[in-house]
Image (spheres, helix red, strand yellow):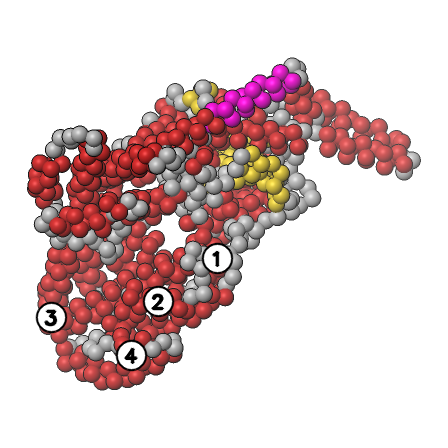
């Protein structure tokens, strides 16, 4: 499709689309449609409808409790929709631009694609925390700190910003440390000496954690950039093979595939395996320190501390263990001293195949009842044989006899021994 | 050639349809009601602290004489083995005539932080085994372990071989240091002492996060986009939500048990290297002389096949069988193909061995 044709199509359909979308939106029965209707790009409409700001609108459709699995799924789904719509809008803008400026030739559209991917790279290599297509691994962990206002991630961020912006790399982190080195290393004096030292230590640990977090995010952002490059490679390969994507969903699947592929490499890399535990450990060190400060506060209020609770739990646990060990000892003493012999006898009895013996007896009875005494005599033989046989049988069936028994899964199973 | 053949009007149409599905689907979700967990009839026959032992009602008159005790992992909830009528390993086993028991570990709280592997394996599992033995007048029963529960069952069989008649393990890690084991790679340099000393119990949400981050884009984005296609089908949506509920229904992990499991299994790989001891008892795999059935999934990204297959040759058993299922870790329990293959394989194998 050439540029003019594209524009013509667009203009011709625009009016109809406006009506259709307005109609769709109004059918939702929400007045917010008018205020969010896009002036230019129709994808704004879809994307904004998924934004958090519009979420209450979607929530108004939802009769679920905030904690139900349905609500959790709805929230996750809306989050995914939001990203999808953002991608759609981005794709639409990008490809409209590419189509207008780039034209049909591969060189032209790849050049345009490069330009757009450059913006993407810039986003992920800036100091922004990636929120698109990547998880912040510490979101769960750091939420533990949210209850302590001073160490909430927001406040830590503001604190960093107050020092001249978030560090853009390890170097940035070090300069902040230097900046604060004097105050954080100042010796404590007087009554509050211990408290002051603990506060200083907490701040040092907080900064140390932020430094590692930046390293981690840098690595993950690099991974996202690699995903973008792979995405481009895949598109070029498709163009060479004269294949094309027909829908936004297909495009999203391609994007997810590329992201998963690069993510898998990143998380298996040595760098990740070095940074990931370092990040976890940095956060936990901070958390542990805060816990000890919280305990100090609780103790000063004459309230039970975590340390004391743990001590009580441990004592109860040890007592229960002792009781259970005593119970087990009693049980073993009460137990028949000949239990092992008894068990061996039970094994032998099992081998006797009681069911078969019973069947034989039943058959014999039947025959007797029918008055065919002569026929009953030979039938007694197998019983004797069966009774005698087990003694010679090994306790464990030899492996060689097993393989063909697993008729159905045989194609997918292998009997290791005896094959 | 430009690789995107998308007309603006078609794209808008696509999104418009998508939104309509979404709106209609949210209505369906509102009317879907409670999402059940576990479908097979059962009775709680024994409780011990927070754990419950369930006995499932047999579906056949002619049942195996020796019952099976299913030992599930501490991670997530055991109803995954009985998720819905057409996705239930337990139902499949019952249909094979297996007499099924299962341990539900419950939800540990702060007071359980000192529960260790000895409490779980030589304590809870052992007492459940004793209970079943008494109830059936037997001195040994069959064990069926799932994932981490398989590792526990293996350890139990090594420490109490006289109480285990047959050992079945499914998607069970034995060798924790195979190169393709991503979870293990992540655990190697983790300061687990710091983790447990700080948090006490390990929050289930953190484990969820860890599992999600193995496939973050598919599991947090693509999956929910695909969900939109199910929204107009109540049955499919219900099935999706049931699985969703299971995925995020993650009990916290008792701190000490977690510490030991990470240190001794993931970091030191003692089950393979030797030298493992639980509650003062040596765990020597050579003590496992009973028949073993090892079922693993060829596309398991959580427990790679090699991690499971390592059991071969490490035990003292002369009757060792492997069954490879072509699928993933969860697929082994919920896919239609797995349920057509796995329960009959386990049921048949057990029946053969009494």
Q: How many angstroms separate mark 4 from mark 1 (CA)?
A: 37 Å
> Which numbered circle lies on residue B338?
none
Residue labelled with disc 3: A102
Q: Nearer the viewer, residue B198 or A238?
A: B198
Where B26 falls versus B344 (above or below)? below
Chain of the residue that carries numbered disc 1 in the rendered image: B
Is B244 situated above or below A18? above
Q: Which mark is residue A34?
A: 4
Mark 4 and mark 3: span between their CA atoms? 34 Å
Q: Which residue is mark 1?
A: B239
**Please, is residue A256 above or below residue A205 in the view?**
below
In the displayed structure, does residue B32 sit left or right of residue A38? right
Q: Position of residue B8 (x, y in %)?
A: 24, 75
Are the residues tagged 2 and 1 within 8 Å (C-beta)?
no
Query: Residue A348 is drawn in which quadrant?
Result: top right
Within 10 Å of the Cα at label 1, are there few (<14), some (14-19), or many (20+) other Cα atoms?
Answer: some
Find the distance from the CA under tag 2 to the CA under tag 1. 27 Å
Of labels 2 and 1, the one closer to you: 2
Instruction: Give the label on residue A56, or none.
Output: 2
Which element type, helix, strand or loop, lies under badge 2? helix
Q: Which residues are magenta?
A: A317-335
> For this rendering, which residue is in front, B309 or B24?
B24
């Amino acid at each position: 499709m050439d540029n003019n044709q594209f524009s013509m199509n667009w203009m011709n359909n625009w009016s109809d689309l406006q009506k259709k979308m307005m109609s769709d939106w109004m059918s939702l029965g929400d007045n917010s449609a008018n205020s969010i209707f896009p002036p230019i790009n129709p994808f704004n409409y879809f994307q904004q409808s998924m934004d958090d700001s519009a979420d209450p609108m979607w929530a108004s459709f939802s009769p679920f409790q905030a904690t139900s699995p349905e609500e959790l799924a709805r929230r996750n789904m809306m989050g995914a929709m939001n990203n999808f719509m953002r991608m759609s809008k981005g794709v639409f803008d990008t490809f409209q631009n590419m189509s207008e400026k780039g034209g049909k030739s591969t060189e032209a559209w790849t050049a345009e694609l490069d330009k757009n991917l450059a913006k993407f790279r810039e986003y992920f290599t800036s100091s922004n925390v990636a929120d698109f297509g990547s998880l912040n691994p510490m979101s769960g962990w750091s939420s533990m700190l949210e209850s302590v206002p001073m160490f909430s991630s927001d406040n830590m961020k503001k604190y960093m910003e107050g020092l001249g912006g978030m560090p853009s790399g390890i170097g940035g982190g070090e300069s902040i440390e230097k900046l604060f080195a004097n105050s954080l290393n100042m010796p404590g004096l007087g009554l509050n000496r211990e408290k002051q030292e603990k506060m200083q230590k907490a701040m040092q640990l907080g900064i140390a954690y932020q430094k590692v977090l930046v390293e981690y995010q840098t690595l993950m952002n690099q991974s996202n950039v690699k995903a973008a490059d792979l995405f481009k490679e895949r598109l070029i390969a498709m163009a060479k093979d004269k294949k094309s994507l027909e829908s936004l969903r297909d495009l999203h699947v391609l994007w997810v595939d590329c992201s998963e592929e690069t993510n898998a490499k990143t998380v298996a890399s040595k760098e990740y395996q070095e940074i990931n535990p370092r990040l976890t450990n940095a956060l936990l060190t901070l958390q542990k320190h805060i816990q000890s400060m919280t305990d100090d506060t609780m103790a000063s209020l004459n309230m039970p501390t975590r340390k004391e609770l743990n001590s009580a739990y441990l004592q109860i646990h040890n007592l229960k263990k002792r009781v259970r060990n005593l119970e087990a000892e009693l049980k073993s003493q009460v137990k028949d001293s000949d239990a092992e012999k008894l068990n061996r006898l039970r094994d032998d009895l099992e081998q006797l195949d009681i069911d078969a013996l019973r069947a034989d007896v039943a058959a014999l009875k039947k025959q007797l009842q029918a008055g065919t005494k002569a026929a009953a005599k030979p039938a007694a033989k197998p019983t004797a044989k069966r009774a005698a046989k087990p003694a010679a049988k090994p306790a464990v069936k030899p492996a060689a006899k097993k393989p063909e028994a697993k008729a159905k899964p045989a194609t997918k199973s292998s009997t290791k021994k005896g094959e | 050639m430009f690789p995107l053949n998308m007309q603006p009007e078609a794209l808008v149409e696509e999104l418009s349809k998508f939104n309509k599905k979404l709106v209609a689907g949210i209505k369906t979700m509102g009317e879907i009601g409670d999402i059940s967990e576990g479908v097979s009839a059962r009775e709680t026959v024994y409780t011990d602290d927070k754990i419950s032992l369930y006995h499932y009602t047999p579906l056949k008159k002619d049942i195996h004489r020796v019952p099976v005790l299913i030992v599930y992992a501490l991670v997530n909830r055991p109803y995954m083995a009985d998720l819905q009528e057409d996705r239930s390993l337990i139902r499949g086993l019952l249909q094979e005539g297996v007499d099924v028991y299962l341990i539900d570990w419950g939800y540990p709280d702060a007071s359980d932080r000192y529960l260790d592997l000895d409490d779980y394996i030589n304590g809870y599992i052992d007492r459940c085994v004793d209970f079943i033995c008494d109830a059936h007048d037997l001195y040994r029963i069959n064990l069926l372990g799932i994932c981490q529960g398989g590792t526990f069952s293996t350890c139990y069989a090594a420490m109490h071989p006289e109480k285990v008649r047959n050992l079945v393990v499914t998607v069970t890690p034995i060798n924790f240091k195979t190169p393709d084991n991503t979870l293990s790679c992540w655990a190697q340099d983790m300061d687990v002492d710091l983790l447990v000393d700080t948090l006490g119990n390990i929050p289930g949400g953190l484990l969820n996060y860890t599992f999600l981050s193995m496939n973050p884009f598919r599991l947090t984005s693509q999956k929910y986009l695909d969900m939109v296609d199910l929204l107009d089908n109540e049955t499919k949506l219900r099935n999706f939500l049931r699985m969703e509920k299971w995925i995020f229904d993650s009990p916290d992990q008792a701190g000490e048990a977690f510490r030991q499991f990470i240190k001794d299994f993931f970091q030191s790989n003692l089950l393979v290297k030797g030298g493992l001891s639980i509650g003062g008892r040596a765990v020597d795999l050579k003590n496992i002389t009973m028949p073993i059935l090892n079922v693993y999934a060829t596309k398991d990204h959580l427990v790679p096949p090699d991690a499971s297959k390592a059991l071969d040759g490490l035990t003292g058993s002369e009757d060792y069988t492997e069954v490879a299922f072509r699928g993933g870790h969860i697929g082994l329990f919920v896919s239609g193909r797995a349920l057509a293959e796995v329960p009959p394989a386990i049921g048949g194998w057990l029946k053969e061995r009494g």
